[in-house]
Amino acid sequence: KLDLQGAERFVLTGGEAVLERVRVIYTEIFFEQLYAGAWLFSEMNEFLAGRGFKHCGLSNIVHARDGDLVQANATFRRV
């Protein structure tokens, strides 16, 4: 599981060559900017989709008081 307080983007882009051997990614994702420079869900989804992964689920979902999504864990699998 990637849970890097917003640094997931640096690990995924820095280890892009390794992604070819990965079948499943389970990572923390954000729907609001909680950490400077962190990818939002849409950015991570676009990056991973471009490398052959499909978003297939959310867990540990956190909502703001107004009901908006804040963060969750997401599973992506190679298609």
Image (spheres, grey):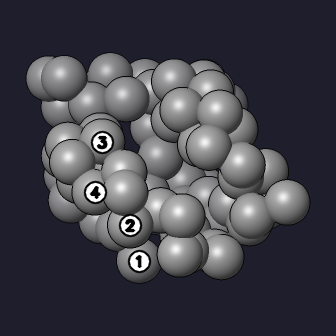
Say above or below: 65 vs 25.
Answer: above
SS category of the residue bearing label 2: helix
Tag 2 near tag 4, CB within 8 Å: yes
Res 56 quadrant in image: bottom right
Q: CA distance from mark 4 to mark 3?
A: 5 Å
- Confirm whether residue 38 shows in the render: yes
Badge 1, how many Cα within 10 Å: few under 14, some, many 20+?
Answer: few
Q: CA distance from mark 2 to mark 4?
A: 5 Å
Say above or below: 40 vs 22.
Answer: above
Q: Callout 4, which amino acid? A: Gly
Tag 3 near tag 2, CB within 8 Å: no
Kindly identify the residue that appears in the image at 36 percent across and 51 percent down.
Answer: 16
Q: CA distance from mark 1 to mark 4?
A: 15 Å
Residue 8 location, x and y as percent?
29, 49
Res 57 quadrant in image: bottom right
Q: Callout 3, which amino acid? A: Thr
The residue indicated by pointer 3 is 13
Q: Callout 1, which amino acid? A: Lys
Q: Residue furthest left?
A: 36
- Residue 63, numbered circle: none
The residue indicated by pointer 4 is 15
Residue 71 location, x and y as percent?
49, 45
Badge 3, how many Cα within 10 Å: few under 14, some, many 20+?
Answer: few
The residue indicated by pointer 1 is 1
Q: CA distance from mark 3 to mark 2?
A: 10 Å
SS category of the residue bearing label 1: loop
- Residue 18, numbered circle: 2
SS category of the residue bearing label 4: loop
